[in-house]
């Protein structure tokens, strides 16, 4: 009996040692297989592969509490009350902030938060853009324009309310581009409000993948290119102003890694920094990030660790010094972020 007990003890000890040795090896094999299922989210060609056992920062799972320090290169420096019950959008131009909400546009000093001017809008504004000549605003169904030396908005275009929901606008000195979530298209207008074209992701009638009441964004970037978020596909897409998509410049991917877009419809808003890096905003959970214009993750500006889960609008703009401005509708404020090394533009 004693010998039998000893034999059982030896067998048990041997089994325990085997488990201790085998488990870590099995875990490494499983992790390797899982990792191979996800290509590099910041590689537009999706052709990335590596044998390295050390994950690059952008390929790590997005955990708000453990973002690599190398990506935490922005600080929030101010949080300015908008003065609106329903703040909708924000733009920066001529050293001032232009904030759209309720039934007005407030012109604000970004350093002090002091309101300089309040401009009445005939209908509840949904988006705003400003250039060197004029301010352009959309309501859900109309486009309004006001020259910078004037104080009244003029309606230049109106669309049927049953089939349109204008959610964003951008403009150069000759053309206006208005994003309509109901039709999933971007209207190209002249300054008189006449439609000169409709922009789709590809030829034909293919639409941007966005819900009829959801947001998507259109901005003018470097070399006059249009950048448009396609949130239902997790993409940032590049077009010329004639509406031709430069497919080699498109980037973005859904997933749970740092460089991916999370949720179902993201990114909802984008903005461009002076060096052509692109800022993106996501919801559910809320995140603000910076990418190169080829889709390489550069920074995590803010995440669900800092941003309220109740945010429904996270509109973006930037200034000539590389500050990032984000409208936070849950607190009805404008958050201002600055790169930690302020001697170098982001």
Image (spheres, helix red, strand yellow):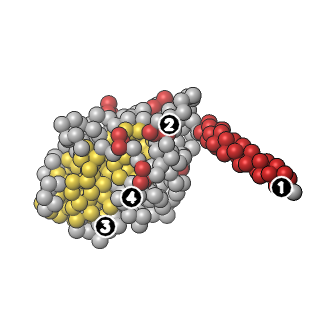
Looking at the image, residue 121 lies above or below residue 302:
below
Q: Which mark is residue 2?
A: 1
Q: Earlier in the sequence, mark 3 or mark 4?
A: 4
220 or 188, which is in the foreground? Answer: 220
Query: In what quadrant of the picture does the N terminus appear?
Result: bottom right
Q: Earlier in the sequence, mark 3 or mark 1?
A: 1
Looking at the image, residue 125 lies above or below residue 73:
below
Kindly tell me whether residue 309 is visible in this rendering.
yes
Q: Position of residue 331 (x, y in %)?
A: 31, 67
The secondary element bearing badge 4 is classed as: loop
Q: CA distance from mark 3 to mark 1?
A: 74 Å
Q: CA distance from mark 1 to mark 2?
A: 52 Å
Q: Earlier in the sequence, mark 1 or mark 2?
A: 1
Q: Earlier in the sequence, mark 4 or mark 1?
A: 1
Q: Earlier in the sequence, mark 3 or mark 2?
A: 2
Residue pictured at 25% horizontal, 43% vertical: 339
Q: Would residue 184 be found to the left or right of residue 3 on screen?
A: left
Residue pictured at 41% horizontal, 58% vertical: 304
Q: CA distance from mark 3 to mark 2?
A: 36 Å
Quickly name the residue at label 2: 55
Kindly tell me whether residue 102 is visible in this rendering.
no
The secondary element bearing badge 1 is classed as: helix
Q: Would residue 19 be found to the left or right of residue 154 on screen?
A: right
Quickly name the residue at label 3: 331
Q: Which mark is residue 289?
A: none
Image marks 3 and 2: residues in contact by CB distance under 8 Å: no
Q: Earlier in the sequence, mark 4 or mark 2?
A: 2
The secondary element bearing badge 3 is classed as: loop
Residue pictured at 14% horizontal, 54% vertical: 111
Residue pictured at 16% horizontal, 46% vertical: 94
Q: Would residue 222 be found to the left or right of residue 245 on screen?
A: left
Quickly name the residue at label 4: 305
């Amino acid at each position: 009996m004693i010998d039998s007990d000893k034999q059982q003890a030896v067998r048990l000890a041997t089994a325990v040692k085997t488990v201790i040795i085998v488990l870590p090896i099995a875990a490494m094999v499983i992790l390797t297989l899982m990792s191979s299922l996800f290509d590099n989210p910041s590689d537009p060609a999706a052709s990335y592969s590596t044998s390295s056992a050390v994950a690059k920062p952008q390929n790590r799972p997005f955990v708000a509490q453990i973002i690599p320090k190398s990506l935490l290169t922005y600080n929030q420096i101010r949080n300015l009350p908008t003065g609106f019950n329903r703040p909708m959008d924000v733009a920066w131009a001529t050293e001032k902030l232009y904030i759209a909400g309720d039934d007005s546009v407030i012109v604000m000093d970004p350093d002090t938060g002091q309101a300089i001017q309040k401009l009445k809008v005939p209908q509840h504004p949904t988006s705003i853009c400003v250039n060197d000549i004029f301010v352009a605003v959309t309501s859900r169904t109309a486009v309004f324009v006001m020259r910078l030396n004037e104080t009244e908005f003029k309606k230049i275009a109106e669309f049927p309310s049953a089939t349109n929901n204008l959610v964003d606008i951008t403009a150069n000195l000759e053309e206006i581009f208005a994003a309509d979530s109901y039709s999933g298209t971007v209207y190209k207008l002249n300054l008189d409000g006449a439609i000169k074209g409709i922009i789709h992701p590809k030829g034909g009638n293919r639409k941007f993948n966005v819900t009829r009441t959801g947001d998507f964004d259109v901005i003018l970037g470097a070399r006059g290119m249009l950048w448009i978020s396609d949130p239902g596909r997790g993409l940032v897409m590049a077009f010329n102003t004639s509406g031709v998509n430069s497919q080699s410049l498109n980037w973005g991917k859904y997933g749970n890694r740092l460089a991916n877009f999370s949720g179902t419809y993201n990114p909802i808003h984008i903005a461009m920094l002076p060096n052509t890096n692109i800022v993106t905003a996501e919801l559910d959970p809320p995140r603000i990030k910076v990418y190169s214009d080829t889709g390489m993750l550069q920074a995590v500006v803010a995440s669900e660790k800092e941003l309220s889960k109740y945010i429904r609008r996270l509109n973006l703009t930037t200034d000539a010094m590389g500050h990032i401005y984000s409208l936070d509708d849950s607190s009805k404020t404008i958050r201002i972020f600055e790169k930690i090394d302020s001697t170098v533009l982001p």
